Each structure stands twice: as C-alpha cells, then as structure tokens.
Image (cartoon, rainbow, N blue to C red):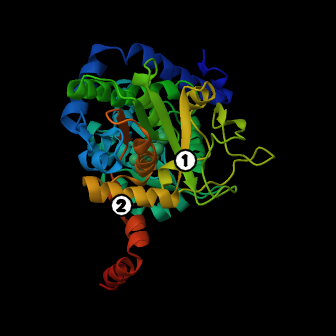
Amino acid sequence: MARYFGTFGGQYVGEVLKPALFELERAMTEILPGSEFRREYSHLLRSYAGRPTPLCRADNLTRELGGAEIYIKLEGLAQTGAHKINNALGQVLLAKLMGKQRVIAETGAGQHGVAVAASAAKLGLECEVFMGSADIERQQPNVFLMKQFGAEVHPVEDGSKTLKDAVNAALKCWIEESSRTFYVLGSALGPYPYPDLVREFQQIIGIETKQQLSDMTGRLPDTVIACCGGGSNAVGMFSAFLDDPVRLIAVEAGGTGDKPGEHAVRMGKDRTMGIIEGYKSYFLQDPDGQVQLTHSISAGLDYAGIGPELAYLGDAGRIEFARATDSDVLEAYSRFASREGLLCALESAHAASEVLKQAPQMEKGSILVMNMSGRGDKDIFITAGRLYPEEWKQYLLREAAK
Ligand SMILES: Cc1ncc(COP(=O)(O)O)c(C=O)c1O
C-alpha cells in the first residue's frame, strides 16, 4: 500500500512500473533490516564515506553576529563532497543484495550522479546516469568525475533539458528494463517507497548531529537550518528533531526575482498542488498544469517540485520555509569562506544566508545548527566567474589556448 504524508506522496505511476516498485518495497522490508545489509552499510559509511562527519562550532561568525552560538554539520566532508553519498551508497548496496547488475540514476547538479557512480564503482555494478544537456553544459566537472568512476552519462534533450527531464528519462529506461536494473533516486521524492527509502538513508545526518551537539553542549539546538531542493538533506537533518521543541527552517532558491522562471520557491504563498513524476506535492506550474521553468544559481535547488514529506510538514506548520536570492547566496558563500575557512556548496550557501539573518536575532547563548550539505569545490566555475570575472576569464582563455 502506497504511503502518504497527509494527502502528499502516493504512487501515481502506470501499471508497467508497479511491479518494479513492489519489488523495491519488498526489498525494503526483507533486506534493509537484515544483519548483512546493516553490517555492510555501516562499514561502508565509516571506512569509505567518511562518517561520522564533524559538527564544527563557527567561533568567528558566532562572535561577529553576536546572537546564537552557531554549529555547522560538515556533510561536505563526506566522500564525493556532499550528503548525496549516504543515499547513493545505501541504494546501490540494496541493489547489489537484490541481485541487480546495473544501476541507473538521474542527476541535476551532478552531485547525486557522482555519488552513485562512485558507489557503483566501489560495489562493482554497472552505472548509467541521465542528465539534462543544459545541466551537462553548466556542470562539466561532475560529468568528468562520473565518467572517471566508470559511469556512462546519457544527455537528455527533452523539455528544458534539466533535472525533471532527466527523472523522466531514467523512469522510462527503468520501465523498459527493470529485471537487472535498479533505479537509484536522488532526493526524498518520487513515487512511494522512494521518499521513505531516501529518508531512511539520510536520517543519519540528524541522528549524528543530535548526539554530537549533546556531547559538546549537553543541549538540543534552538533552531536548525537546511537548504531545500527536492528535500533529502533537510528531511535527513530535521527528522531527528521533529518531536523536539526545535525550530526547523528549510531554505528554498529565491533566484533572481519573483516572476516565473526566476526562482524555485515551491512553498510560497500561492503554492500549487500537482501530480508529477509519480507523486503528489507542490510544484511550480503554469495555469495549464505544465511544469514551469525554474532558476537558481545552484543547480541542485533548481527543481520545480518538493518532496511530499516536507510539503506536508510545511502545511502542518512544523517546518518554516525561507528563501535566499542568488546574490544573498554569493554573499554568504564569501562570508563563510573568509570567516570560517568553510567553502559551502552553492546549495548549502542558501542555508548559510539564512544563518546570517537568524543568528543576530537569537538570544545570546541559544544554539543554531546549520547543515552544510556539500562543499563548494564543484562550483568554482560559477563562483570564480561571478566573484573575479576578469581574472577568471583570462585564466580560462590562457588554458584554452594551450
Ligand atoms: C550539496 C547539495 N545540497 C543540496 C542539494 C539539494 O538536494 P536535496 O534537497 O535533496 O538535499 C544538492 C543537490 O544536488 C546538493 O548537491
């Protein structure tokens, strides 16, 4: 039976996909709780993915902002540079124990694709990744990494040539061949049981953070902040605090303006429900129900839908939503780098921007935790081009002329 979060979620797929989703649901109940999976997964997380990731006190920003004590969970120190590896490793291991030989995945920014390609290389499975050709254009370094890890990268030329089109292409491929293939979905969305499966693998972020903060301070945080694309790092961080008196803030991409195509704010005042890519949630749509174009400086938040659990918790008032514009994000990126020596991924810099707004308003001695979902090395072609345009252009011209 498909699970819902209130009225969100479900499994809105054609009959052809039902057997593959049923097989996945069965594997979740039979293989996931088993000792073989548990032992191997926790071994891989420790010895390969780099867990536990540190929780770091941001001393300089705490002093400078003058309000809350700021702590940052460094998911960017995990293997392949982001939280995406927690889920990719879990799903690829599940695929292997189900007897599958090939994994396929969609990717937007490329971070999920890189994490899946690395996991498949580590566990000895074939890997194919679907990626919109527009995203390939702006995330070349990640395309190179996926290929190095042995994955085949398929450019998707449909629609806006971005993440939603890559999801559709991966689902189509899975429908055509599911007997030896496992679809590794990258965020807490899609048809049931994927939102549950992804939360299962990402909840380690919140569990570790709660324990680490308790060891360091003996306390719970007052506020926790995470950025929000499809929602996997936010769900993973927030799930440990849902029953506690802790304020939870998810930060969406405010982009360059409020007009359609200028942002990726799904949880604004006039949110619209839809059923797209197999699940019911809020999507940015035009009046005919067509998915709208989105924009964000970060490819990972540039997505028209939001995971069903976050949409539900948002409507229920348990999670607050904020937004950061592209220019807020660049400012936060530079501030965290120069004050704390931390290079946030552009996605995570959305959360960092909200930290800069919230911390000074909070009482001295209160605790603010931010999830730094990834590190910013992958974004250097965007950030260097924006922050030092002339120097960067000259460097690229010199390199191209060699
Ligand atoms: C570093 C990083 N953070 C956040 C996201 C957004 O995804 P999610 O909302 O599923 O955490 C991405 C997506 O690629 C990412 O690479």
**Rendering quadrant holding ligand 1:** top left
Image quadrant of residue 351?
top left
Q: Which residue is mark 1?
A: 323
Helix, strand or loop for disc 1: strand
Helix, strand or loop for disc 2: helix
Q: What residue sits 43% from the left and 29% below the top?
A: 238
Above-or-below relation of 184 to 385: above
The location of residue 87, given as percent across then percent down, is 39, 34
Alpha-carbon distance for marks 2 and 1? Answer: 18 Å
- Residue 319 appearing in the image: yes
The location of residue 183, given as percent across then percent down, is 48, 36
Q: What residue sits 25% from the left and 32% below the top?
A: 45
The answer to which of 53 and 396 lies nearer the viewer is 53
**Circle 2: residue type:** Ser
Q: Which residue is mark 2?
A: 334
- Residue 144 appearing in the image: no
**Circle 1: residue type:** Arg
The location of residue 304, given as percent across then percent down, is 62, 46
Asked if residue 247 lies left or right of residue 124, the reply is right
